[in-house]
Amino acid sequence: MAAPGFEPGRQSELLVKLNRLIERCLRNSRCIDTESLCVVAGEKVWQIRLDLHLLNHDGNIIDAASIAGIVALCHFRRPDVSVQGEEVTVYAPEERDPVPLSIHHMPICVSFAFFQQGTYLLVDPSEREERVMDGLLVIAMNKHREICTIQSSGGIMLVKDQVLRCSKITAVKVAEITELIQKALENDQKVRKEGGKFGFAESIPNQKITAFKMESAAVNTNNVEEQAEEIITKADPPSEVFAKPILHTPGTAQIGEGIENSWGDLEESEREEAAEEESESETAAFECQTMETEDTSIMKETKKDEPIVLSDSEEEEVVILEPQELPRKTRTQTNLKQENTSKKAFNKRRRKKRAAY
């Protein structure tokens, strides 16, 4: 139900009443030829189901639902079927044209709202009027003035004359609505045969919400160039160049009126700045490279001139340099052969001393 007053997923009292009333109006009135829905007697039949979706609840849902239901049944087309022996063939719409339902008559509901215990009568009440009404009378009738169903709600007592008066009004309203439905169905069928635009969206007229929609305008562009040249020739000559500010009104001034554009100068200045930045970066990089080469050459020279210190111990010697010299560490290189010879000489001396004792 398209209204904030209804709970989603739960059938309200109005929805239950609407389902029962539409079922009595369409099914119990036998507006559809049920025998035409039979394919094989006692075995196969067509099942018709009608689903109504409410888009906006602004009152008198019963009348709108009955009109939408009967129009949907009249507009519906079922696939064509052929029976050969025991074989049943259902044809697609591309193979055979669908078949419309056989409709005997069009039952349409008309609602009447009563106020002040039946003193005042109102046809087609709105949502606000339904809130304050005392009772509601619904009459379903076709264009042959046959009453299909009638229902009264609200606990109001109606007189026979009031019911007869409502039935006469219903007959007039049903005749008008039936004529409109038939014209709409004929126009839709005609447009479909011609291959034009059809459907629910095309049937809605443009209102305020679609006020900005405009039809495509035909524009002739054959003589555009000639017209442009004529406009240029007829145009006034350019105004004089004013280098000084012009005072139009006291307190205001305009500078640069009529002067040539100077956007190109800005581009040249930007290019000069970029060239200067590149040259500065190149010089800085060259200076860094020269400093690195000098440092490496100094290190190599110091390593070549430095003497190699040999000692008997295998431990590393730590040398503390002066601040003027480069901070570096030196390691003493030990000669394994010299150590071996010194050990042999020491052992010989020791043996001689022992032999002397």
Image (spheres, helix red, strand yellow):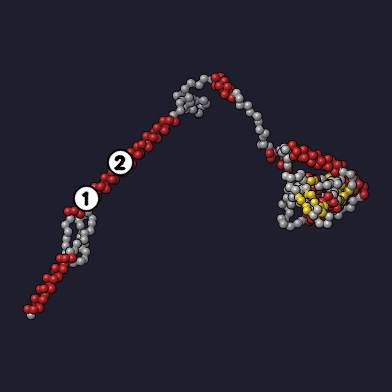
Judge from the rendering whether residue 299 lies leftward or rightward of residue 31; answer left or right: left
Q: Residue furthest bottom?
A: 357
Where is mark 1, residue-wise? Answer: 298
Residue 244: tell me if it is visible: no
Q: Residues within 10 Å of mark 2 (few under 14, many from 20)?
A: few
Residue found at x 71% / y 42%: 201
Q: Indicate the position of residue 58 as horizontal and vertical percent values.
A: 76, 47
Q: Residues within 10 Å of mark 1 (few under 14, many from 20)?
A: few
Q: Earlier in the sequence, mark 1 or mark 2?
A: 2
Against 277, residue 19 (above or below) is below
- Decide which of 82, 294 is in the foreground and name it: 82
Q: Residue furthest right?
A: 160
Residue found at x 76% / y 50%: 90
Q: Indicate the position of residue 129 as horizontal and vertical percent values.
A: 80, 47
Residue found at x 80% / y 45%: 100
Where is mark 2, residue-wise? Answer: 283
Judge from the rendering whether residue 125 lies leftward or rightward of residue 237; answer left or right: right
Q: Indicate the position of residue 91 as horizontal and vertical percent values.
A: 75, 48
The total of numbered circles placed on residues is 2
Q: Which mark is residue 169?
A: none
Q: Label 1 to label 2, Cα distance in Å?
A: 23 Å
Residue found at x 84% / y 46%: 103
The quadrant in which the C terminus is found is bottom left
User: CB under 8 Å between callouts 1 and 2?
Assistant: no
Q: Which amino acid lies under the numbered mark 1 shown in the image of this protein?
A: Ile
Q: Indicate the position of residue 141 as horizontal and vertical percent values.
A: 87, 47
Element at label 1:
helix
